Image (spheres, helix red, strand yellow):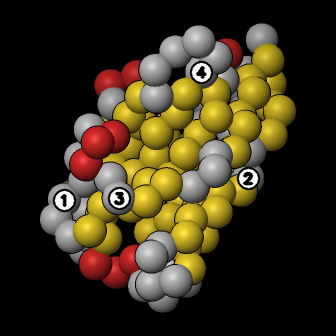
């Protein structure tokens, strides 16, 4: 079992930055692809970014390309999401997810473990 705990969310003005962290416990994440998803009120949970277990392959949804950066520190068993130039439409609960082995996937059904989420609110 892998337990995931997100942190770093909060309220920020448009144009600002936040850095989310996802701390894993129970197992090392070195063999897990990791991803961030988000869910806005009344909407489906959507893919944001993913990083392969080795870190060599990274994918982003189009709306965050050039603004968000996903990274991982396997020694710290932690995954990060640096979010810059935030927009009101980025407001959502952000979830961390883990998928055993392989590259990252944009499909939430492919992930084995999920965190509880952290709220990000961007004011205009």
Residue 73 lies, with reference to residue 69, above or below; the image says below
In the rendered image, residue 82, in percent from the top left (x then y), is placed at 57, 49
In the rendered image, residue 31, in percent from the top left (x then y), is placed at 28, 78
Tell me if 42 is positioned left or right of 1 in this view. Answer: right
Q: Return the disc, 1 or 3, that comes first in the chain's sequence.
A: 1
Circles 3 and 4, Cβ within 8 Å, touching? The answer is no
Tell me if 87 is positioned left or right of 48 in this view. Answer: right
In front of the other: label 1 or label 4? 4
Residue 94 lies, with reference to residue 3, above or below; the image says above
In the rendered image, residue 57, in percent from the top left (x then y), is placed at 21, 58
Report the number of numbered marks.
4
SS state under label 4: loop
Query: Which residue is tagged 3?
Result: 112
Query: Which residue is tagged 1?
Result: 103
The alpha-carbon separation of the residues under discs 3 and 4 comes to: 22 Å
In front of the other: label 2 or label 3? 3
Query: Which residue is tagged 2?
Result: 8
Q: Return the disc, 2 or 1, that comes first in the chain's sequence.
A: 2
Q: Residue at x 16, y 65 (%)?
A: 102
The alpha-carbon separation of the residues under discs 1 and 3 comes to: 14 Å
Tell me if 89 is positioned left or right of 14 in this view. Answer: left
Label 4: how many residues lie within 10 Å, few (<14), some (14-19) or many (20+)?
some
Query: Which residue is tagged 4?
Result: 40
The alpha-carbon separation of the residues under discs 2 and 1 comes to: 25 Å
């Amino acid at each position: 079992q892998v337990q995931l705990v997100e942190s770093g969310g909060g309220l920020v003005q448009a144009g600002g930055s936040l850095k989310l962290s996802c701390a894993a416990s129970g197992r090392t994440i070195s063999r897990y692809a990791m991803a961030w998803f988000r869910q806005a009120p009344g909407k489906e949970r959507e893919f944001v970014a993913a990083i392969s277990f080795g870190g060599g392959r990274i994918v982003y949804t189009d709306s965050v390309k050039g603004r968000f950066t996903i990274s991982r520190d396997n020694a710290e068993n932690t995954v990060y999401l640096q979010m810059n130039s935030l927009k009101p439409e980025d407001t959502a609960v952000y979830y961390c997810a883990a998928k055993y082995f392989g590259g990252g996937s944009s499909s939430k059904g492919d992930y084995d473990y999920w965190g509880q989420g952290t709220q990000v609110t961007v004011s205009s």
